[in-house]
Image (spheres, rainbow, N blue to C red):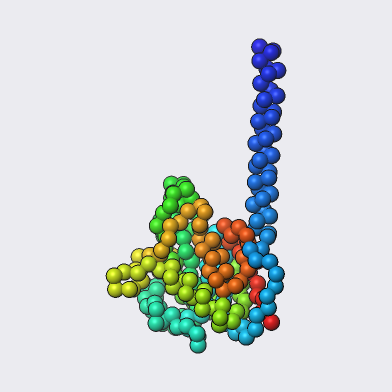
Amino acid sequence: MKYIKNLTLPRLYRYFTRYFAAMFFSLLLLYCSILIPYKWGNYPKHNCNIKICISNTGIHSNIIVPTENNVFDWHKYLSVDEIGIDNAKNYNYLSFGWGDRDFYMSTPSLINLKLSTTFKALFLPTPSVIYVKGYQIIPNYLEVKCIKINQNDYLPLINFIESSFQLDANGRQIRLGNGHTDNAGFYAAKGSYSILRNCNSWTAEGLRKANVNTPLWSGLSSAIMLHFQSNCK
């Protein structure tokens, strides 16, 4: 018995040492990838007069853009007055978020979190959804950060958001249901949600289209907020 004990304890020690070492280096690598920018170098831009914002709910990040300006008018692409149930026609800003369809639509807050829905969203490729919200003013009850970009960078961002909508046979967006607030609605989206491409990965992908820097790993909304800054003069 003593022989077996002397034989197994060193093995257990080596096992746990390797396990915790691997865990430590994995977390260190993840932490570094949050701090490291996707793009190195500063490339100053000029004529930046279009404001875009990112909101952070703690889990999700959302892209906020003007409803209309001299570059793009969302009224020509989306039935803005039908986004929510309040039928407002004077939204000055629209917020777009992408995510897992079941999780997004059934989880308005962490209180409503279900283990089965979370597991499916993280580990199985699942249908996606776009969450659209309309605002008269930029919301001050969320963590919001805004910068200005120029027209040449703004258009690729808009094209990215447009191309994320799934369309019906008539080329119209497919509204799936009301949002968690009166000024919001859910729409069918392209692409599958997974742990490798989540809601914040979608936000980061859109920002990179606009030449806005993002973290090397963009799975966390807080990481996106950290790197979100203007390079305009």
* Relative to 113, 45 lies left or right: right
- Residue drawn at 67 percent across, 38 percent down: 20
**Which quadrant is home to the C terminus?**
bottom right
Q: Position of residue 97 (x, y in %)?
A: 48, 66
Q: Residue at x 65, y 36 (%)?
A: 19
Q: Where on the picture, by quarter, is residue 145?
A: bottom right
Q: Quadrant of residue 186?
A: bottom left
Left or right of 21? Residue 119 is left
Residue in view at x 54 percent, y 61 percent: 200
Q: Position of residue 138 (x, y in %)?
A: 55, 76
Can residue 218 be seen here? yes
Residue extending furthest toward the top: 1
Q: Could you tell me residue 183's position as x and y percent?
A: 43, 73
Residue sticking out furthest to the left: 169
Q: In front: 225, or 23?
A: 23
> As displayed, is residue 12 above or below residue 100?
above
Q: Name the residue at 65% across, 80% down.
A: 45
Residue 182 shows in the view:
no
In percent of width and height, residue 148 lies at 61, 79
Quick check: 19 above or below 82? Answer: above
Task: Determine whether 3 is above or below 228 in the image.
Answer: above
Look at the image and tell me in which quarter the N terminus lies.
top right
